[in-house]
Amino acid sequence: MTEITRVALQPIAKGAVTKIWLGVAAIALAAGGVAYAALPPTPTVKTLTAGSGDSPTLEDVVLISYKGMLANGTVFDENKSFPNRVTDFVPGFTKALLKMQRGGKYEVEIPAQLAYGATPPPGSPIPANADLKFEVELLDYKSLAEIQQQQRIMQQLQQMQQQGAPGAVPGAPGAAPAPVQP
C-alpha cells in the first residue's frame, strides 16, 4: 500500500498576491530599462517638407544642400548642391539619409556617438563628444553604377571630340561636319 504524505497549505496572507504581482512588474520594468539603455543611439529625423518616391540606399550618391550646427546653434559647415556617397558621411548622417525622400527637407539630430565622438576632425570647430544638428534638403540621388556609366559615356564623347571625331555619329554634338560632295 502506498502512503501519501499530506502537507497542510497555509492560507495566503491578505495582499500577498498583490505584492507578488508588483514584484514581477518591477522586475519587468527594470529589465526593460536595461534593454532600452543597451540600444544603440539613432539619429532623429524630423520632416520639414515631405519628399516623394523611394529613399536612397547605401549604394547611392546623394546631392544635398545642408547646414551643420552645434547644439548651441553655431554653424560649423554649410554647403549647397553637395554630391557625396551615402556611405561617406558620419554614421548618423548616413542613417538619416536612408530615411529621406527626394525633394524633402529635414531636421536631423545626431548623437555624438554617431558623429565624431571624442575625436572630431583636426582644426574643426566641433568639440569632442558634441551632438550635431543639420538642416538637410535631399535634392536628388542616383546609384553609383548609374553615375559611373554616365562618366564612361562622357569620357568616350570627349575622346571622340579630341580625336577629330572619327567614327562619331554625324550630327551628334561635337561631331565634325560631314564633307561636302561635289
Image (spheres, rainbow, N blue to C red):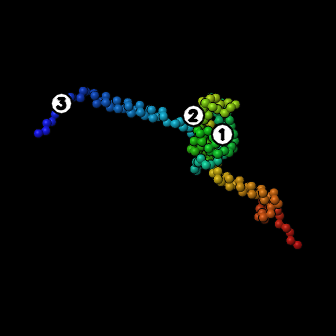
Q: Nearer the viewer, residue 63 or 37?
A: 37
**As shown in the figure, which amino acid type bears the numbered disc 2?**
Gln
Q: Quadrant of residue 163?
A: bottom right
Residue 113 circle label: 2
Q: Nearer the viewer, residue 146 or 171?
A: 146
Q: Marks 1/2: CA distance?
A: 20 Å
Residue drawn 83% across the image and 66% down it: 178
Is 79 positioned to the left or the right of 168 in the image?
left
Residue drawn 64% across the image and 29% down it: 127
Q: Residue 97 at what x, y percent from top left?
A: 59, 43
Residue at the extreme bottom of the image, as rendered = 182
Q: Is residue 170 above or below residue 88?
A: below
Q: Is residue 76 above or below residue 144?
A: above
Is residue 168 shown to the viewer in this render? yes
- Quadrant of image for the C terminus: bottom right
Per the image, label 2 sits on a secondary structure element best described as helix
Q: Nearer the viewer, mark 3 or mark 1?
A: 3
First in sequence: mark 2 vs mark 3: 3
Residue occupied by mark 1: 66
Residue at the extreme right of the image, as rendered = 182
Residue 8 circle label: 3
**As shown in the figure, which amino acid type bears the numbered disc 1?**
Tyr
Q: Marks 2/3: CA distance?
A: 60 Å
Per the image, label 1 sits on a secondary structure element best described as strand
**As shown in the figure, which amino acid type bears the numbered disc 3?**
Ala
